[in-house]
Amino acid sequence: MRIAWIGKKTPFCGNVTYSREITNALLDRGHEVSFLHFAQEESQSDNWPNFQEVPLPFIYKSQVYTIPTFKATKVLTDSLREIKPDIVHASLTLSPLDFVLPEICEQLNLPLIATFHTPFAGKGAKLISGTQFLAYQLYAPFLGNYDRVIVFSQIQRDLLARLGVPDAKIAVIPNGVDVAKYSPGPSQIKTEFQAERLFVYQGRIAPEKNVEALLRAWKQSEMGLNSKLLIVGDGPLKPSLQPFYGAESGIIWLGFIADENRRIEILRGADVFILPSVVEGLSLSLLEAMSSGLACLATDVGADGEVLEKGAGVILSTKTVRSQLKTLLPLFQDHQELTTLLGQKARKRVLERYDLTKNITLLERLYTEVLYQKPIQLSRGA
C-alpha cells in the first residue's frame, strides 16, 4: 500500500515519536511511505526510517503548533498529486493545514485519515483553557470531514462524540510500544548514580506536566541518600526549577536524551516511573516505562488513568498530587516487593493492550476499511 504520511519530525514531542514509530512499523510491513512534514534545518532524530520526504514551508513551529507559509498548501497539493498515494494519513500538527486537508484530498479523490492526539484533562473534566480548549472546540466541526479519525482511548472517543464528531468516523487505536525493545533487562544505571532505589520522570519540563509537584513532594519526603530521582527532559520551566531542586536532595537533571538506547538503559535500571501531568493524550513515555517493567504512578488525565486501571499502576488525583506523592514515595522506597509486583502488572497490561505490533495490524485493517468501505471490527479485548 502506498501511504502519504503528514506529520512532524521536529521539535521533539509525542507527535514526533508517534510518527516515527508508526512509519517505521509500516515500512517493516512492506508498505511504501512518503513523509510530508514541516522541514527544519536540524540534525535528524534517531531511528528515522529511510523514506521519501517532502518539506513543507513554515513560518513558525513549536512542540504545540505550527504556522505554515501561504505556499504550503500548494506544495502539499502538488506533492500529493505527484505521489499518488492509496491513502493519506495525517498526524494532526495543530496547523491551519489540518483544516484544508480534507478539501485537498477530496479534490484529488484520496482517502484521508487523521490521528488526533491533543492532550486533555480526563474523565468528566472540563477542558482547560489554552491550546487544549481551542483544539477540541475548533477541531470537532472539521474532524467529520476526514474519512476516519483515530484516537487513543474510549474516553477521548466519547469526548469528541459529545462535541459532534460522528461516532462512526472515530476509531480507537491506542498508542503502542515496541515490547521487545522496551523490556526488562540488565542496566548499570544504579551503579552509575550510586543509588539503591531509582525513581524517574521523563517528559517536558512545562506547566502542563506539573513537574514541580513531584519535586516538592520528593524534597518534603526527605528521601534517603540511597534514593535518587532522575529528571529526563527539557522545557521552559527547567531554568526556574533546577536551582531549587538539586543533587543535595537526590534529584539529578539529565536533560533531553536523544539516544534511545540510553533511555532504555535508564528505564531498565529504575524502580518507579512518575507522571504528574494535569493534561495528557496517551503518554508514550508511560507506556515505555510500563513495558520496561517499572512500577508506574500517573495522574488520571487523558487516557493515562485508563492505561493504569484495575491494578496496572497507581492512579493519582490531579487535585492532590503532591500530598499523595509525599505518602507514596517513601512507601515505594521501602517496599521493593511492591514495586516489583506493580512492574510485572504494568508489563502485562502493555502486552495485552498496547503492543505496537498488534496496533499496527489494527491500523492496516482501518486502512483497508477506508479504502474499500467494508466495515471491520476494530475493538480489542481488555
Image: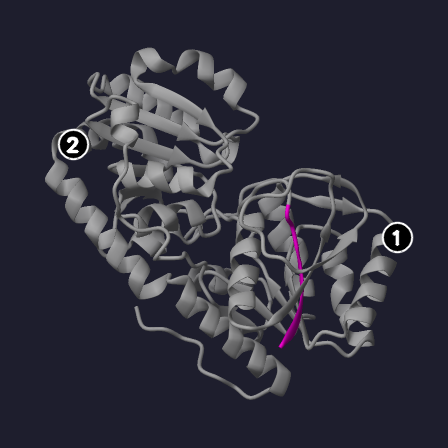
Magenta stretch holds residue 8: yes
* Figure quadrant of the C terminus: bottom left
- Which image quadrant for residue 150? bottom right
Task: Examine the rendered structure and indicate whether residue 366 appears above or below residue 68.
Answer: below
Question: In this view of the protein, which residue sits in the foreground, 156 or 12?
Answer: 12
Q: Amino acid at mark 2?
A: Leu
* Residue at 85% over, 65% down: 78
SS assignment for the magenta stretch, majority: strand
Q: Which mark is residue 71?
A: 1
- Residue 22: give x, y in percent of width and height: 53, 61
- Circle 2 residues within 10 Å: few <14, some 14–19, many ≥20: few
* Figure quadrant of the N terminus: bottom right
* Residue at 42% over, 45% down: 285
User: Mark 2 — residue?
Assistant: 331
Badge 1 marks a residue whose secondary structure is loop
* Residue at 32% over, 26% down: 229
Badge 2 marks a residue whose secondary structure is helix
The way the protein has been coloured in the rendering is one colour
For the residues labelled 1 and 2, the Cα–Cα distance comes to: 57 Å
